[in-house]
Amino acid sequence: MSKLITKMKRSATVVYKNTRSKRARLTAPLTNARPEKKIVSATHTHNYMINDTLVDWLKSRSRRGTRRTPVYTGSKGFGQFIMRKGVEFETALVKHIHENRTPIVTVSDYITDDTCRLVVNLMKQGVPVLHSVPVKNNYNRTQGVIDLLVRSDWLSNIVDIDPLSVIEKTKSASRLNGDYHYVVVDIKFSTLPLRADGIHILNTGHYRAYKSQLLIYTQAIGRIQGYTAPYAFIMGRRWKYTSKKITNHGFSCLDRLGKIDYQISDRSYINETKNAINWVRDVKENGSTWSISPPSRIELYPNMCLDSGKWNIEKEKIAKLNGEMTNVWNVGVKHRNAAIKAGITSWKDPACTASVMNIGGKRGPVIDEILKINQQTTDKIRPAVVQNNINNWKEKCNEVYVDFETLSDIFGSFGDLPQQKSSDMIFMIGVGLEKDGKWEYRSFICNAPTIEEEYKVMDDFMKFMRDLGNPKAHYWHAEKNFWKRAENRQFDLANTVDRKDHISDDWTTPEWCDMLHIFKYEPIVIKGCFKFGLKAIATSMRDHGMINASIDSSCNSGMMAMVNAWKCYQYSDNPVNTETMKDITKYNEFDCKVLWEIMGYLRQNHM
């Protein structure tokens, strides 16, 4: 008889085939027999835990052929790059631990009866550290592949700060042969967000899903060893936590682990994970009977606060059709659900207000203005006259419009493990200005992704600004912070007194003017626009004929610019002159020019 073989998480391809279902049944099943529950993989609970449940339904309909699988757009390159880097990070880190701290036995990427039995045997032998550990839990019908399975008395051989007390580390498991038990350790290509105690993990981003995933693994191991540990751990690239308004950072993978405590701070995950498992089964068994227009159940409302990769296009279609409330700035799932509970299911309903969604404070009036302009058909933009004059924006003066393109530290190498120091950098500075009523643009681009090249680009930009008489620099949201971090970095890394003096004396801080503040403070709202992102505002203003700038680039996001630029630097001898870098420059110029056109429109029509 053929065996069910499943390739888990380290491959994009599912390599299984169950041929038993194709064979003729020798006997009819007993009509009163209880059907066996479907197996749920730990990673499949992810969307439920982050409130992106619609994606599970879309996937199930795609597999059944009732909906077309969407084509990747926009952030495709970035998402795939992150996945590859995550695998590379795990591989490099496991190799480093094996060669420098303690031997590691790798089991298998495949979940089969044989590999699961092998895991049991290795645990009974007391092997200290196992990697890529396939497990099944026949009690709740779950399965998965654990990154690292470590003996409780062996954790201190891997990390500098032992996360367990003497009593915890020597707690024995009834089915093992020593004063220890096994604990689950997951490896994540991210900075660990720790609570103020510097030990436990916060519930931010995808960490809610990770906590659920590790609970499933921990429960499976508990069935094997006769003791279910009340904790699990995550190993990240770095860690940080804030205590008494002071932020602490660590830049070593092996300094400390982030702890998940299923007895106290993370106790709620026990029930939430049960619900997540039931949800996955429910989608598989009953999803074909559900509908999305209108949603037949609350889990089918799209969560527009999350990036869902290739499913974004489908989510956007559904959100537009149904008037999804999480499309609105600062409206989350809990706010939308509060409105649904009050009988409001769409922002199109005139009764939909910030108050109905339990949103007050400074955000409430802003959200109400966004809703009001989109619930009417007369005005295209409000207010008719903008009252605020933040940074004296109404006065035309010596001014430029600036946009930076940056490389995140996700592009760093793993050659210095366990150290993972931050290596963000600016690789392109774009600056535009009006000269004799016409648009002019200039870019400064690094020849290589190095700190020295970043210094040259920043220095050239400063010279350019001095030559213009140190004009006011308009930007959108981020550039001032990018510049401050880069300036501090360059000063700290300067290896001569002369360079430090040059940075201190000659890099005159521009008068940074964040145009986002002009829009949010008033607020300025536009029909068809629900957020305060530059792309969203520019698109709506162009649709209404308020501005003309359109993007002439295949690059359509900062994330895509990052990935494409990195490829240029890796594979080209002359990256600045490649077609790819020229395309990124067009994208950068678009962001600068949009700022100029928006400012011109406001000055001409709303003062």
Image: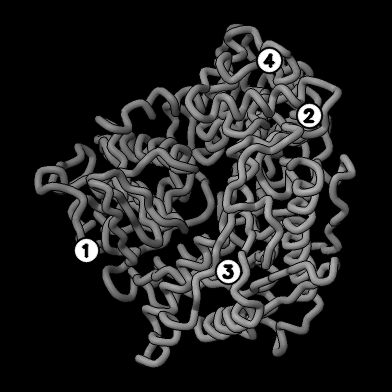
Residue at left 62%, top 27%?
367
Query: Would you say the residues marked 4 and 3 are in contact, meaning their CB atoms lie under 8 Å apart?
Result: no
Residue 539: x percent and y percent?
A: 80, 46
Position of 421 relative to 338 (above/below): below
Image height of 136 relative to 396, above or below: above
Residue 182 can be seen in this image: no
Tell me if label 2 and label 1 are in contact, CB under 8 Å.
no
| Secondary structure state at the residue bearing disc 1 | loop
Single out the mark in the foreground, 2 or 1. 2
Q: Quadrant of the C terminus?
A: top right
Question: Going from the N terminus, do you reach mark 2 or mark 3 first?
Answer: 2
| Residue that numbered label 2 is attached to | 320
Residue type (three-letter) at the residue carrying disc 4: Thr
Q: Position of residue 547 (x, y in %)?
A: 85, 50
Q: How is the image coloured?
A: one colour
Disc 4/disc 3 C-alpha distance (Å): 40 Å
Label 2, label 1: how many angstroms apart (C-alpha)? Answer: 51 Å
Left/right placement of residue 49 relative to residue 74 reads left
Tell which of 221 and 274 is nearer to you.
Answer: 274
Could you give the CA–CA distance between mark 1 and mark 3, rounded to whole angstroms? 30 Å
Residue 475: assigned label = none
**Residue 473 sits in which quadrant?**
bottom right
Q: CA distance from mark 1 to mark 4?
A: 51 Å
Q: Amino acid at mark 3?
A: Leu
**Which residue is rendered at x = 35% and y = 39% of the image?**
218
Residue 476 higher or lower than 458, as above or below:
above
Which residue is denoted by mark 4 in the rendering? Answer: 345
Q: Earlier in the sequence, mark 1 or mark 4?
A: 1
Nearer-N-terminus badge (2/1)? 1
The earlier-in-sequence mark between 4 and 3 is 4
Residue corresponding to mark 3: 407
Residue identifier under label 1: 160
